[in-house]
Amino acid sequence: MITAIVDHTVHSWRLKARELLRRGIPPEKIDWCAENGEKSLLPAEEMSSVSPSREIKVPADFLPLATSVCAHTDPRRWAILYRLLYRLTHGGEKHLLKMPSDPDTRQCQMWAKAVGRDIHKMHAFVRFRLIHVDESTGKEEFIAWFEPTYRIVRLGTPFFVKRFANMDWSILTPDECAHWNGKHLTFLPGANRHQVPDSDAHDDLWRTYYRSIFNPARLKVKAMQSEIPQKYWKNLPEASIISELIAGSKNRVDEMLETPERPVKPMPNNAYLRSLHTKEKSPETP
Amino acid sequence: MNLDRKLQILADAAKYDASCASSGAAKKDSRGGKGVGSTGGAGICHSYTPDGRCISLLKVLLTNVCLYDCHYCINRRSSNVQRALFTPDEVVKLTLDFYKRNYIEGLFLSSGIVRSADYTMELVIEVARRLREEHHFRGYIHLKTIPEASPELIEKAGRYADRISINIELPTQASLDRFAPEKNLANTQGAMGGIRTRIDEVADARKEFRQIQNRPRVKPPTFATSQSTQMIVGADDSSDSVVLGRADELYRDYKLKRVYYSGFSPIPEPSVILPLKAPPLIREHRLYQADWLLRFYGFDVKELLPKENPNLDLEIDPKLSWAIRNRQFFPVDINRAPQEMLWRIPGIGVRNVSRILAARRYVNLKLTDLLRMRVSLKKVLPFIIAADHTPSFGLLESDQLRTQFLAKPKQLELDFSAPAPTNADQIITLNGQL
């Protein structure tokens, strides 16, 4: 039994997997372990770098799939990913990734999909707070606290680099933190939420907007709850007013229904308005 | 009036415009420059309100003062709603402040008509111009356009926006005459035609520009990548056939990206011309389903709404309704039928049709494969043949085929001591958890 130790990046898994594949080690002979910073007490089998032989060809789809799967947290992922890789290469099942009926393909695709959803939620729910404006350059500095489900900080932050390239910002999560200073994106170990200010002067304006854009005659609480999973609510400033909005809807709709209907007011003295009405009254030209 | 109060009035005024898309824009970002923002991927919903709708953009009116008197609208001149007006800088600042905090994908800006169509358009355009040219904003901008404005102004608006739209509001001129006396269908269609032409021209020019070897210093023209519109449903007496017929025509003639259907909803300032009623949410939902069938499933309006059925079935979805009325096409063999027929199977969407087509090259598909694709077997079984299934004899011929798909009726307790249900009760029961 060979022990393979990897961290959560696809890079680490890929190096090990390439080695093992070159040596032709079948999936059932490998024990995949997470790197936990401690040196293992047992001597791991020597993973010396063998001189590169022929290139191993995998379908183009495989690497993006592996990148996503490695960011997941299920402990079985490395083993199943390797089994998929082994079957694609040594096993000769070249079309494996196109067969959603295959259990290994299906499992990896589901993991990748969950990671993809988590990345999308990160892009949606990271909320920055302004902490500093440089008086001379006007450069603004922002910070955010976020709690992703999977190890997606490195996968999700390039989006913010493209969008906020000219602001300095940091995204702090329990696992890992990302910092952008206008030139480089750096990653540091995880932080805790007290390092990020609780609120921002803009929260009140946002709540005003949130309250005003909501239509009380169309209450659909289940739809709202299914789109924003429970875990994200505690970090969104609008969460505090939702129950009052729901509770008040019926009264607001009742009030609308009880309001007496307004009569039509006469047309004001406006040349543009008059021109619209005279145009309509004339017969249509063929 | 302070900013918070203005925001309250002018966001409240904008909520009846259903459009919330932030996708489909040309790819741009703020690397290597001095601005902020990016577009070009899928749209992102940054929050959701208790009406189930997503918040993707800052959606406001520049002002809710309006010369027009459209009777479904809270901002019409006969309404007593409190009026407010943003300065362009106030809108710019709100947009940038929310955007930098990642609360929004961009701005959706509309306005009541003040002084004249051109005067109003110029104010709206000024906001977009400041965002793009002074602040180098590369996020999403959706501008609403007034069809009566001059074509030059409409073109200028398109230069700064990713999406531009004009609301047709009602499907016939007769309805407009009654409920929106200043609006004209021919004007609106003329403006949409002009926008479509411009969208196509710029798309071609940009394509050519990309292919030129020695690029001149001149940049290619910019313009919105798409236009959309909205129709109000349930305010006038137009049938679904009329509404969808108009939508179909607009998609074909003006290449609209989307038609939005907005169920007429109670407003705080009702008009004597248009009494309030419960919003027709189920009807709106069926219209969206039918709209999808027209655009992605190869259906024709006449197939969904033949002369004898001018309105969509509220109790079952339009595809199932069509299938029950056209049983001669079924059962469909999922392992052999062409894509166009697979699209017509109730309960199987376009994505699953693609999956079926991909998978059946290697394997004969069984019911377990459909289950894995999360297809509702109950819906699909009478209509398909799979490797391990054919529908039982007589199932398709049965008179009861439609009834087995209806939601089970709830057993109601009759309470003769309770007061009669009020209008409000009816609204709550109709718009409660659907």
Image (cartoon, coloured by chain):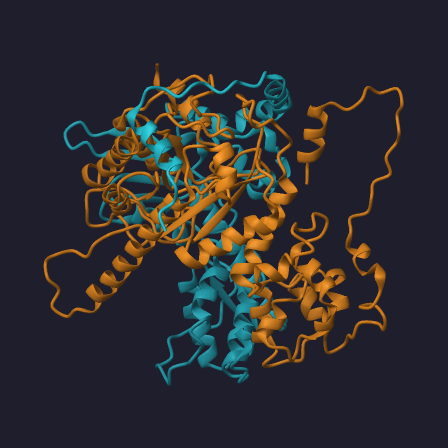
Chain colours: A cyan, B orange
Image quadrant where residue B338 sits: bottom right
Q: Position of residue B254 (x, y in %)?
A: 39, 55
Q: Is residue A78 visible?
A: yes
Q: Position of residue A105 (x, y in %)?
A: 57, 70
Left or right position of B4 against A244: left
Number of numbered discs visible in the structure rendering = 0
Image quadrant where residue A110 sits: bottom right
Give A235 or B82, whichever is nearer the viewer: B82
Give B146 or B337, whichever is nearer the viewer: B146
Who's the residue at 37% across and 25% down the image? Answer: B67
For the C terminus of chain B, the quadrant is top right
Give B183 or B43, whichever is nearer the viewer: B183
Left or right position of B432 against A146: right
Image height of B33 relative to B49, above or below: below
Q: Position of residue A14 (x, y in %)?
A: 43, 68
Q: Is residue B101 visible?
A: no
Who's the residue at 39% across and 48% down the image? Answer: B189
Left or right position of B214 against A143: left
Image height of B359 relative to B325, above or below: below
Left or right position of A22 against A240: left
For the N terminus of chain B, the quadrant is top left
Image quadrant where residue A205 sits: top left
